[in-house]
Image: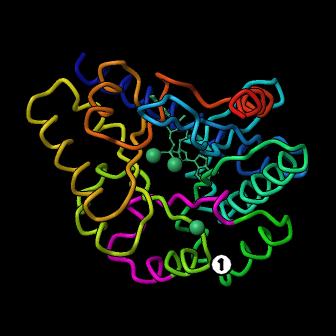
Amino acid sequence: LVKNRRDRHYAFYDEIDYDTIVENKKLENGFEKALADKKFEVWYQPKFNSHTGKIVGSEALIRWRADDGSLISPGRFIPLFEKNGNIIRLDEYVFREVCRQQKEWQEEGIQILPESVNISRFSLYYSNVVEKYERIINYYDVDHKYVQIEITESAIIENTVIVELIQKFHDAGFDILLDDFGSGYSSLASLNQMPFDTIKLDKSLVDYVGNENGEKLLKFIVQLVQSLGMKITAEGVEYKEQLDFLENLNCDDIQGFYFSKPLMLADFSAKLTENN
Ligand code: C2E
Ligand code: MG
Ligand code: MG
Ligand code: MG
């Protein structure tokens, strides 16, 4: 009996693995066509000033529109493309789309706001990455202050090549945002590795609100970051209690479902126009 149960147990997991492998292959094989057919959509999550509640910028977040009309989230396909190298082209596509859209809004007379783009560390290994991104932003003639770069904390730890490349992006005029701060384990070291403009507090730390020691830690982190001359944006703020606590700490910007989920272009465009 025990043996049978164990067999079932293994059969169950084998099935899941098999389905996942097939599904992964479909996503990998579908990349070229999806890119050509513009099935990758840039969504926009607004960021808000903690005191005024006004929109101060946004983050570009990629989604894949499947043939049945549903959306595939980046957590599903980014890891696959980081493995097969397609992330380089996907990140470049998002960067280009953001530059192009910023230019379009400007030509429509809309006051644009800084928008951040996530760049995988695997995109950074590509040769002449800074020169390539420079050519794109210059082609669209958008001021560097309107396109920011987010790099996740885990990417830079003890990686001097990445640190140098990020420094090059910074020297070119891009603001650099350290993403997911506090989710790794060498957080304090990463703060000293290069001049970040903004630190993005990971949702797991925002979830400390309501916990006595957690709140002390948050207070310390916000003060530390600001004393180093950097701005701080809180990610994953979902509750009023979290907003109130962070506003009290003078945390600069707030990003999270409490204010807004990521929006499709038309909806964000409308918000941007309202905000003008
Ligand atoms: P991230 O850069 O840390 O982006 C924040 C993620 O948290 C987004 O998930 C966003 O929708 C989600 N989020 C925002 N506010 C809340 C909240 O209040 N509660 C909760 N539960 N979640 C919230 P999303 O869009 O699924 O993206 C996941 C990750 O995929 C991103 O994490 C980023 O690492 C990666 N990603 C997205 N777009 C790109 C891209 O164009 N290039 C690269 N390389 N990575 C990307
Ligand atoms: Mg990000
Ligand atoms: Mg700048
Ligand atoms: Mg993040």
Image quadrant in which the N terminus is located: top left
Q: Residue at x 49, y 79 (%)?
A: 167
Magenta region includes residue 149: yes
Q: Tell how many labels.
A: 1
From what the image shows, is residue 161 above or below residue 166? below
Q: Position of residue 220 (x, y in %)?
A: 16, 48
The image shows residue 108 at horizontal and vertical percentages of 90, 43
Please state if 146 lies on the left or on the right of 2 as rendered.
Answer: right
Q: Is residue 44 left or right of residue 267?
A: left
The residues colored magenta run 144-164
Q: Is residue 104 above or below residue 15?
A: below
| Circle 1 residues within 10 Å: few <14, some 14–19, many ≥20 | some
Is residue 131 or residue 145 the one in the foreground? 145
Counting from the top left corner in percent of width and height, residue 43 is at 69, 37
Q: Please report the residue visible at 54 percent of the width from the left and 38 percent of the height from the top.
A: 47
Residue 204 painted magenta: no
Residue that mark 1 sits on: 130
Q: How is the image coloured?
A: rainbow
Instruction: Give the amino acid type for the residue marked by disc 1 in the picture.
Output: Val
Q: Is residue 210 above or below residue 78?
A: above
